[in-house]
Amino acid sequence: MSQLEQNYQNVKDRLRRATSGAQRNTTPILLAVSKKHDIEKISALYQMGQRHFGESYVQEAVAKIEQLGEFDITWHFIGPIQSNKTKLLAAHFDWVQSVDRMKLLRRLNQQRPAEMQPLNVLLQLKVGDEDSKSGADFTSLRHMAEAMHEMEGLCLRGIMCIPPPADDKAQQCLYFQEARQAFQQLQQEFPTMDTLSMGMSNDLEAAVETGSTMVRVGTDIFGKRPQ
Ligand SMILES: *Cc1c(COP(=O)(O)O)cnc(C)c1O
């Protein structure tokens, strides 16, 4: 078995164990985060059955998507978004998970080609309120979700979050609970929301215990990212 295959099996085992440990019926979707890794690795993982891939850098991602055009891959964008890149995102991706401001929604909606399915969107919630990474607060998320009613090129699927790094599992769970509460609250108003994207290599178990429906794993599948 190759190192990649071994890593992949290990991550899937962790995911299954966390799911049954939390008495949950449905195993979260595994998003393989392939940023900085070459298409040979992506295609090897695809041969093992993986279908959801996540990328963070627009140019790199678009090149890969074009080269792997004949594969039946669902592509997710998970990186920070500059507004001059929305056109490429709208034209090439199935999901965009890192939307944190209204302007991006408007642009993605206008730029989604009419012949494509609506773009699946996750709104990125800021959790663990320090400077951390990007993301918007709950009130902004709510406004964005409301505005999406009028946007036919987009489909609101849920929330994504990237909490500050924490090694302590109890602390990881606290961050994820913040996101789950926001998710559950918004879900009542916006029933197309079915996805809570949280958990990475380091905090996958805590995320699954706290209600994640999609985990995004890079390092523990592909190894350390080349610089
Ligand atoms: C890189 C990245 C991941 C994967 O992180 P690992 O620690 O390598 O598993 C997940 N989510 C986002 C938003 C990322 O940028």
Image: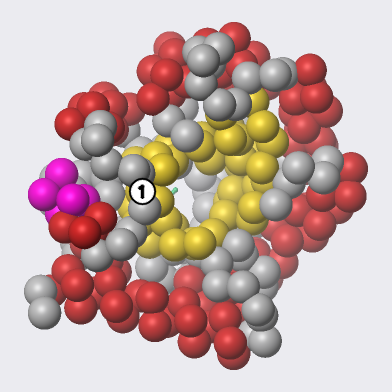
**Residue placed at 23% from the left, 27% from the top?**
66
Task: Tell me what residue is drawn at x 79 percent, y 17 percent.
Answer: 150
Residue 102 visible to the viewer: yes
Residue 220 horizontal side relative to residue 31, left or right: left
Disc 1 marks a residue whose amino acid type is: Phe
Colour pattern: secondary structure
* 222, 5: nearer the viewer: 5
Q: Is 117 part of what is drawn in magenta?
A: no
- Which residue corresponds to the image point at 35% horizontal and 44% vertical from the top-left? 73
Where is residue 47 shown, x and y percent of the image? 21, 59
**Rendered location of residue 19, percent (x, y):** 57, 81
Callout 1: SS: strand
Assign the magenta stretch its main secondary structure. helix
Task: Residue at 51% x, 21% y: name it.
Answer: 116
Q: Residue furthest right?
A: 189
Position of 131 compared to 136: left or right?
A: left
For the image shown, how many numbered marks are present on the structure?
A: 1
Determine crowd level at label 1: few under 14, some 14-19, many 20+ residues with C-alpha closer than 10 A: many
- In the depicted structure, whether residue 73 falls above or below residue 115: below
Question: Relative to 50, does residue 23 appear above or below in the rendering?
Answer: below
Q: Considering depth in this image, is 152 or 57 the residue closer to the camera? A: 152
Residue 63, horizontal then vertical, whole percent: 21, 27
Spot the residue most to the bottom: 21
Residue that numbered label 1 is attached to: 53
Q: Does 162 appear above or below 60?
A: below
Q: Nearer the viewer, residue 205 or 110?
A: 110
- Magenta-highlighted residues: 39-43
**Left or right side of 59 for 126:** right
Task: Find residue 30 and report its horizontal and vertical position in percent.
Answer: 44, 62
Ligand 1 quadrant in view: bottom left
Kindly tell me whether residue 168 is visible in this rendering: no
Q: Quadrant of residue 176?
A: bottom right
